[in-house]
Image (cartoon, helix red, strand yellow):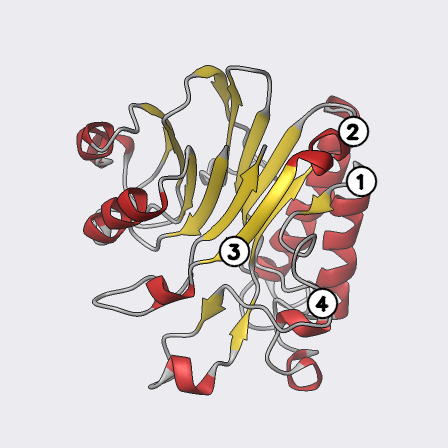
């Protein structure tokens, strides 16, 4: 089984790129974030024609939005509101066979890494705290689960182009890294990509639009993640980041992250 996650930054705008990715990489399950469209305008028909007839979508106009499209049938699907906001940041499905997939778009957190003066950063930290609490009370580490998405945090020093320069920049501050670690440690989630790529190796999934030559500068961050619970760890077979899709015409600023399971 191949599972992919991608912050697409408008699924309607980048539908041709998505369809090309599906054809070339053939994931069984694709989880999208920042779809930026209401459910009635989601390109469900085009994706079904591409072979992804099983869909669980939750979107809103212009902002946020998550979706899971799959060649594998769903036994059920569900979603939650986090921090009391109906802002379409979570979609869960249980695949036939029992594996549960959670697709997240964690709040970015704004520019100032101080919850006392920045409501967006406070929201981000509260969102992560609620993830710890909910998974700890509603799920067990013995269950086969996959957690994917744009978690908007690059936890390791090698997940950013410059640890020293980004220590006070939202997405790599110590308080965020600590909060994400609590989520990961709560159920003993395994970082599926770092399972294959050593922590000493630089690895990114996001490159800013602000860079004129993003590829040459290579000032990236690894904001997009795939985690699995312990029962699935022995089944991990490979992982990659499709960096080439950050380029081309009208790209998302994120690249897809792909994980293969036996």
Q: Which residue is mark 4?
A: 156
User: Which residue corresponds to the image point at 70% horizontal and 52% vertical from the top-left?
Assistant: 195
Circle 1: is it few (<14), some (14-19), or many (20+) Cα within 10 Å?
Answer: some
Circle 4: is it few (<14), some (14-19), or many (20+) Cα within 10 Å?
Answer: some
Residue 108 horizontal/vertical position (percent): 53, 59
Instruction: Looking at the image, tell me whether mark 2 or mark 3 is earlier in sequence order.
Output: 2
Q: Are marks 2 and 1 in contact (CB under 8 Å)?
A: yes
Q: Is residue 181 left or right of residue 119?
A: right
Q: Which residue is mark 3?
A: 240
Looking at the rendering, which quadrant does residue 55 occupy?
top left
Q: Is residue 161 left or right of residue 234?
A: left
Residue 191 horizontal/vertical position (percent): 69, 49
Front-most of residues 161 and 259: 259
Q: Which residue is mark 2?
A: 141
The span from disc 2 to disc 1 (Cα, nearest Å) is: 7 Å
The span from disc 2 to disc 3 (Cα, nearest Å) is: 25 Å
Residue 113 horizontal/vertical position (percent): 66, 70
Circle 3: is it few (<14), some (14-19), or many (20+) Cα within 10 Å?
Answer: some
Instruction: Looking at the image, tell me whether mark 2 or mark 4 is earlier in sequence order.
Output: 2
Q: Which residue is mark 1?
A: 188
Q: Secondary structure at mark 4?
A: loop
The span from disc 2 to disc 4 (Cα, nearest Å) is: 23 Å
The span from disc 4 to disc 3 (Cα, nearest Å) is: 17 Å
Instruction: Looking at the image, tell me whether mark 1 or mark 4 is earlier in sequence order.
Output: 4
The span from disc 1 to disc 4 (Cα, nearest Å) is: 17 Å
Can you tell which of label 4 and label 3 is closer to the viewer?
Answer: 3
Q: Secondary structure at mark 3?
A: strand
């Amino acid at each position: 089984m191949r599972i992919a996650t991608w912050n697409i930054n408008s699924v309607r705008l980048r539908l041709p790129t998505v369809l090309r990715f599906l054809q070339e990489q053939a994931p069984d399950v694709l989880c999208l974030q920042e779809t930026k469209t209401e459910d009635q305008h989601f390109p469900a028909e085009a994706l079904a024609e591409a072979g992804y007839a099983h869909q669980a979508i939750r979107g809103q106009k212009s902002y946020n939005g998550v979706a899971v499209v799959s060649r594998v049938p769903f036994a059920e699907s569900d979603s939650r509101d986090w921090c009391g906001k109906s802002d379409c940041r979570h979609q869960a499905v249980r695949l036939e066979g029992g594996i549960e997939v959670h697709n997240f778009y964690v709040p970015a957190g704004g520019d100032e890494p101080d919850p006392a003066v920045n409501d967006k950063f406070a929201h981000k930290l509260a969102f992560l705290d609620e993830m710890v609490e909910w998974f700890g009370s509603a799920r067990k580490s013995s269950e086969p689960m996959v957690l994917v998405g744009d978690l908007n945090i690059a936890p390791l020093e090698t997940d950013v182009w410059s640890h020293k320069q980004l220590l006070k920049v939202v997405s790599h501050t110590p308080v965020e890294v600590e909060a994400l670690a609590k989520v990961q440690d709560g159920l003993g989630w395994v970082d599926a990509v770092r399972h294959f790529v050593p922590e000493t190796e630089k690895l990114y999934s996001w490159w800013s639009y602000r860079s004129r030559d993003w590829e040459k500068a290579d000032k990236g961050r690894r904001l997009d993640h795939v985690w699995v619970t312990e029962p699935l760890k022995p089944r991990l077979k490979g992982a990659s980041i499709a960096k080439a899709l950050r380029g081309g015409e009208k790209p998302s600023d994120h690249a897809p992250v792909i994980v293969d399971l036996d």
